[in-house]
Image: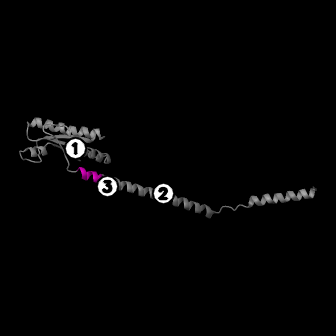
Amino acid sequence: MSFKSITQLFLVGFLGFTLVGCSSTPKTDSDSSNKDVATNQVDADIEAAKRAAAERAAADLEAKKAELKAAIDGKVVHFDFDMSEIRPSDYALIKAHADYMSLVPGASLTVSGYCDERGTREYNLALGERRANAVQNALVAEGVSPSRINVISFGEDNPVDEAHSESAWAKNRRAEFSY
């Protein structure tokens, strides 16, 4: 091979490498701004989806609170004569109160204990307190903090039914809830 052929070959190779190196198109500002716009749109869509999910969760929570509140309003725990043990049928009500309190962290509850008119005033006040404490203990067992529960006994005061019969006395042996 002659010197002229090698020079020509070298020149052709050099031009080929130069053209390959310059063949890419330069990035323009419009390409960069298009990517920025697309990224911003995706970020905005993600934020909108997060807000919508948070709003749905808040609405679901409020609906659950309202449903539980409606289920527990006006309901009381009843007791047998001269007893402070909670009936098995009343544990669902206590569980519903505990669930409601877990959804409303700032809520505090007062459990009021009542008795029928039989027995001395002092005895009925003590029995009413034992009944309210039994409900408080059941709520604590369900996870409610004792500091959120107040206990009070009314004894035989404030009867629901003032008649002097077993059915009236059964209504008066109770523990009531108030928020």
Find numbered disc 1 in the image and state the secondary structure of the residue it sits on.
Answer: helix
Tell me, yes or no, whether the two marked residues, 3 and 2, touch with CB atoms within 8 Å: no
Kindly indicate the quadrant of the structure image that contains residue 156. Answer: top left
**In the rendered structure, which amino acid carries the disc numbered 2?**
Ile
Sequence-wise first label, 3 or 2: 2
What is the CA distance from the residue labelled 1 to the residue labelled 3? Answer: 26 Å
Up the image or down, 42 lies above or below 169; here it is below
Residue beneath disc 1: 89
Q: Nearer the viewer, mark 3 or mark 2?
A: 3
Sequence-wise first label, 1 or 3: 3
Secondary structure that dominates the magenta span: helix
**In the rendered structure, which amino acid carries the disc numbered 3?**
Ala
Kindly indicate the quadrant of the structure image that contains residue 27. Answer: bottom right
Q: Which mark is residue 63?
A: 3
Residue beneath disc 2: 46
Sequence-wise first label, 1 or 2: 2
Q: Residue at x 92, y 58 (%)?
A: 4
Q: Which residues, given as a range, are shown in magenta?
A: 65-72
Q: Residue at x 57, y 60 (%)?
A: 36
Find numbered disc 2 in the image and state the secondary structure of the residue it sits on.
Answer: helix
Tell me if mark 2 has few (under 14), some (14-19) or many (20+) residues whose alpha carbon lies within 10 angstroms of its own: few
Q: Residue at x 28, y 38 (%)?
A: 141
Q: Nearer the viewer, residue 79 or 24?
A: 79
Furthest residue toward bottom: 30
**In the rendered structure, which amino acid carries the disc numbered 1?**
Ser
Up the image or down, 46 lies above or below 161; here it is below
